[in-house]
Image: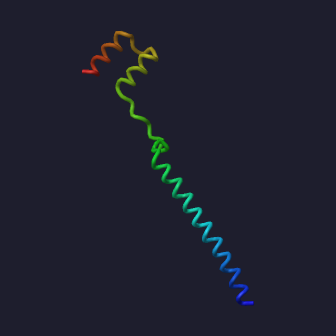
Amino acid sequence: MMFHDFFWGSMWFGWIFWIGIIALIVWALSNSSNRRHPTHLNFPQQETPLDILKRRYAKGEITKEQFDQMKKDISA
């Protein structure tokens, strides 16, 4: 009877061990894929001065002449 209890106990340990190994592999793969694609970090993208200028012109905040002059100024 003692051998029977030992067998069932070691069998459960074997299942728990393999489930842990599989979970570790899944975790490692998901973390490695996140490192390859850093866009998941939700950092705001850096806007260039030209991007800001284009956005202001598109909103109608500045005229075409102001846009051209400012674009010339930031390009210099």
At horizontal 44% and vertical 14% (from top left) the residue drawn is: 60
Quadrant into which the C terminus falls: top left
Q: Quadrant of residue 44?
A: top left
As drawn, 11 above or below 3: above
Residue 36, given in percent of the width and then of the height, sits at 45, 47
Q: Residue furthest right?
A: 1
Decide which of 63, 30 is in the foreground and name it.
30
For the rendered model, the colour scheme is rainbow
Q: Quadrant of the N terminus?
A: bottom right
Residue at image location 59% in from the left, 62% down from the top: 23
Give the residue furthest to the bottom: 2
Seen at 46% across and 17% down, the residue is 59
Where residue 55 appears, as percent x and y from the top left, is 43, 21
Q: Position of residue 75 (x, y in %)?
A: 28, 21
* Location of residue 6 (image quadrant): bottom right
Establish if 11 lies above or below 41.
Answer: below
Image position of 49 with respect to 61: above or below: below
Q: Residue furthest left?
A: 76
Image check: 74 left or right of 33? left
Side of 9 relative to 40 (left or right): right
**Which of the pair 26/51 is nearer the observer?**
26
Q: Quadrant of residue 57?
A: top left
In x, y percent, where is residue 13? 64, 76
Residue drawn at the location 45% of the way across and 17% of the way down: 58
- Say whether residue 7 is left or right of residue 71: right
- Please give the count of numbered marks on the rendered protein: 0
